[in-house]
Amino acid sequence: MKFQRPLYLLFSSLPPSHSSHPFISLSLSLSLRLCVFMAPSFESPQQPEGEIASDNNTHDEVLQKSRVTVVGSGNWGSVAAKLIASNTLKLTSFHDEVRMWVFEETLPSGEKLSEVINRANENVKYLPGIKLGKNVVADPDLENAVRDASMLVFVTPHQFMEGICKRLVGKIREDAKAISLIKGMEVKMEGPCMISTLISEQLGINCCVLMGANIANEIAVEKFSEATVGYRQDREIAEKWVRLFCTPYFIVSAVQDVEGVELCGTLKNVVAIAAGFVDGLEMGNNTKAAIMRIGLREMKAFSKLLFSSVKDSTFFESCGVADLITTCLGGRNRKCAEAFAKYGGKRSFRRA
Ligand SMILES: NC(=O)C1=CN([C@@H]2O[C@H](COP(=O)(O)OP(=O)(O)OC[C@H]3O[C@@H](n4cnc5c(N)ncnc54)[C@H](O)[C@@H]3O)[C@@H](O)[C@H]2O)C=CC1
Ligand SMILES: O=C(CO)COP(=O)(O)O
């Protein structure tokens, strides 16, 4: 019964022009009826629908509000800050303000990016045209941005994380909890290192992951999508992350398989590059579907080779097959590979 609620939400979030289509309105009415019928057995997490009603916080949590800092402010980082900021305003267990660490840049106008974000409430470089929420505060000082935070959301390109972690040692709260939205891994001489492991080991804190079919620009305009939180042992922490991220258009569920979720988010990028080559060489949809099917099978085999604990079921969550599909259809990795193949490999990925 896990699917009816998201299905209902998907259709109920459609604009009137879509929901008036005969097929969609039939599906909508069936979903609504199923929804009402099945309501008590929904497995999907609580939605933040009202001021306090949606916040399953305990008395202690209310007394100790969690402060959230987003480390990263690119395309997905900015959207994550927007999502979180809409929830911290509603949920009493979180401070309203969301700090967002900005890797400072000078814009062509000569202004500093962080100053423009705070003035315009918009990341004009990485997410133009979208208001982040007045409670998002951009901060170019990494140490200051994380100082009082008890919940740290890491969302930078993976290659910067080792340096960021080194700078954060001894600078964060001892009881801080982390989540990584980063799709990638460090490949060292000793072997691959997951980013959540890097964070946990270098900073000595618990680190969950959030991955899924999440093209940032779509979520920015509140189009429906799902995501998966992967956690190691502590279900309560995972549920807190779910509450922080969940909105009616962004449905999050938690699975106890941190490596499986993170490997899905990482390895699907390799398959998306292959899918881009197929597009660039105009090999057709059947070939692309084959790449995706075989790619998914290889993702699973590779993941299990690295971590025998990885669960088969994880590949059927949003972080698995759904992210693979969306990235092979609309992701930036696919786009770069398509352009590269189109120009016979004579264009670098950077120029593509
Ligand atoms: N954009 C998307 O649709 C999605 C992205 N992701 C993942 O999120 C992570 C972050 O990606 P985006 O937010 O899209 O970033 P982005 O690719 O839009 O922007 C790059 C970011 O890196 C920063 N940066 C540049 N040089 C830096 C340095 N030396 N140190 C630290 N930061 C530096 C830039 O200021 C900018 O904030 C990646 O791992 C990506 O795979 C995951 C889901 C969706
Ligand atoms: O991870 C993504 C969607 O879930 C985005 O993928 P790209 O980085 O290829 O755009």
Image (cartoon, helix red, strand yellow):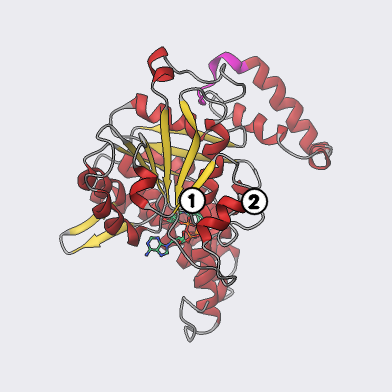
Asked whether disc 1 touches disc 2, contact meaning CB atoms under 8 Å apart, the reply is: no
Read off the residue under disc 1: 77
Label of residue 130 in the image: 2
Label 1: element kind:
helix
The answer to whether 44 is drawn above or below residue 130 in the figure is above
Q: From the viewer's perspective, is 196 left or right of 188?
A: right
Q: Is residue 44 magenta?
A: yes
Q: Position of residue 222 (x, y in %)?
A: 65, 43
Of residues 218 and 119, which is closer to you in this image? 119
Q: Position of residue 17 (x, y in %)?
A: 83, 42
Q: Is mark 1 within 8 Å of ligand 1?
A: yes
Give the residue displayed 76% in from the left and 26% down from the top. Answer: 29
Q: Position of residue 252 (x, y in %)?
A: 50, 34
Q: Position of residue 128 (x, y in %)?
A: 63, 58
Which residue range is magenta in the image? 38-45
The answer to whether 232 is drawn above or below residue 306 in the figure is above
Three-letter code for the amino acid on which mark 2 is drawn = Ile
